[in-house]
Image (cartoon, rainbow, N blue to C red):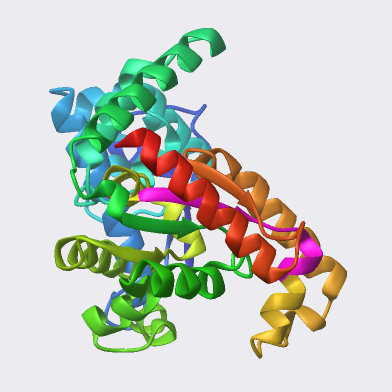
């Protein structure tokens, strides 16, 4: 492993910029190739920097001067062989008028250009302005949701694992005389391999892509259905918007203890090891997703009553709300 300071690079270039102390790390094997995962990530960063530079009509020299880094170093970074420090990424982000995290996302990611434009519009806005913008977006989502005439005939159940999506979903589907769909099983069918293999072979990005395809397939195939949605899907904005647009969405909630006990009852004994830590993790996950789950049409507690009473209350509330929405 060879460590080369960017100051040394600038001196070699004839451009002395002593304030830039970021180190460039070059990890090479005998033939100069990167480890697969490392190389792919560095190429993604280089590609994003190059694409954003093009958007701002900047030359490489212009960006290097604006960011205070050497042009030679920037060339290596854009070529996928320069490993930047966090401080260098921050300098580039400032010069490109974006956030450092924007440099880490593939330019081929769904909606990336639109996200870049949206962040640019919102940058510098205060909390009140951001809240007003969120309300406008929610209104647009709700308006587009009403355009699907089958929306009230599809019930989507969202929530953390152990909330009761499968149990209550099957009961609802049986009484409504429609199909019950476990979306995670459709993902397996679409991908052609189990979920752990999807993650192991292709990674989380590929899983989310299969998850979206599975949802689109389900919406197209079933005009009437009860759909159990994987808990983490709400983290994918575009995919979750499809759920909200095409399904009457119910957020099932439960106490942390009930979540854990139900998962264990399903045969997953992992929460029993370090139970308190697992419970804390669950609370953190819920806190991070709460705002997304709250976009559902209905919130229903599955811990307050026995199963049958919980189901009957859910059924009655759905009938009342759906009657009003028709």
Residue 163 x %, y %: 62, 64
* Residue located at (37% from left, 31% from top): 92
Q: Locate residue 149 relative to residue 292 in the image: left or right.
A: left
Residue 242 x %, y %: 28, 48
Foreground pick, 180 / 13: 180
* Residue located at (30% from left, 89% from top): 193
Residue 237 visible here: yes
Q: Locate residue 45 relative to residue 311 in the image: left or right.
A: left
Q: Which residues are magenta?
A: 248-259
**Picture quadrant where residue 155 is located:** bottom left
Q: Is residue 258 magenta?
A: yes
Q: Is residue 116 magenta?
A: no
* Residue located at (41% from left, 75% from top): 174
* Residue located at (40% from left, 82% from top): 195
Residue 245 x %, y %: 28, 43
Q: Locate residue 156 relative to residue 146 in the image: left or right.
A: right
Foreground pick, 92 / 198: 198
Instruction: Report the quarter where the C terminus lies.
Output: top left
**Picture quadrant where residue 205 is located:** bottom left
Foreground pick, 96 / 158: 158
Residue 12 x %, y %: 33, 42
């Amino acid at each position: 492993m060879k460590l080369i300071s960017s100051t040394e690079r600038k001196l070699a270039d004839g451009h002395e910029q002593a304030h830039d102390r970021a180190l460039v790390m070059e990890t090479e094997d005998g033939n100069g190739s990167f480890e697969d995962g490392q190389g792919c990530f560095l190429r993604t960063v280089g590609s994003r920097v190059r694409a954003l530079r093009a958007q701002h009509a900047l030359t490489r020299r212009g960006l290097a001067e604006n960011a205070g880094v050497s042009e030679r170093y920037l060339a290596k970074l854009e070529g996928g062989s320069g490993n930047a420090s966090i401080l260098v990424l921050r300098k580039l982000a400032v010069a490109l008028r974006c956030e450092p995290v924007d440099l880490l996302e593939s330019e081929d990611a769904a909606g990336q250009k639109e996200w870049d434009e949206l962040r640019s519009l919102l940058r510098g806005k205060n909390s009140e302005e951001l809240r007003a913008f969120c309300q406008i977006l929610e209104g647009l989502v709700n308006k587009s949701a009403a355009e699907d005439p089958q929306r009230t005939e599809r019930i989507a159940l969202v929530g953390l694992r152990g909330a009761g999506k499968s149990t209550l979903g099957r009961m609802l589907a049986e009484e409504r005389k429609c199909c019950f769909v476990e979306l995670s099983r459709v993902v397996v069918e679409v991908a052609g391999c189990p979920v752990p293999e999807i993650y192991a072979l292709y990674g989380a990005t590929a899983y989310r892509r299969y998850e979206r395809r599975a949802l689109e397939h389900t919406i197209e195939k079933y005009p009437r259905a009860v759909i159990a949605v994987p808990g983490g899907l709400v983290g994918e904005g575009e995919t979750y918007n499809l759920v909200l647009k095409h399904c009457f969405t119910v957020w099932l909630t439960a106490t942390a203890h009930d979540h854990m006990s139900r998962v264990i009852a399903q045969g997953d004994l992992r929460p029993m090891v370090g139970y308190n830590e697992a419970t804390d993790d669950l609370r953190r996950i819920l806190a991070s997703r709460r705002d997304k789950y709250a976009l559902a049409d209905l919130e229903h507690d599955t811990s307050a009553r026995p199963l049958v009473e919980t189901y009957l209350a859910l059924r009655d509330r759905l009938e009342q709300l759906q009657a009003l929405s028709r």
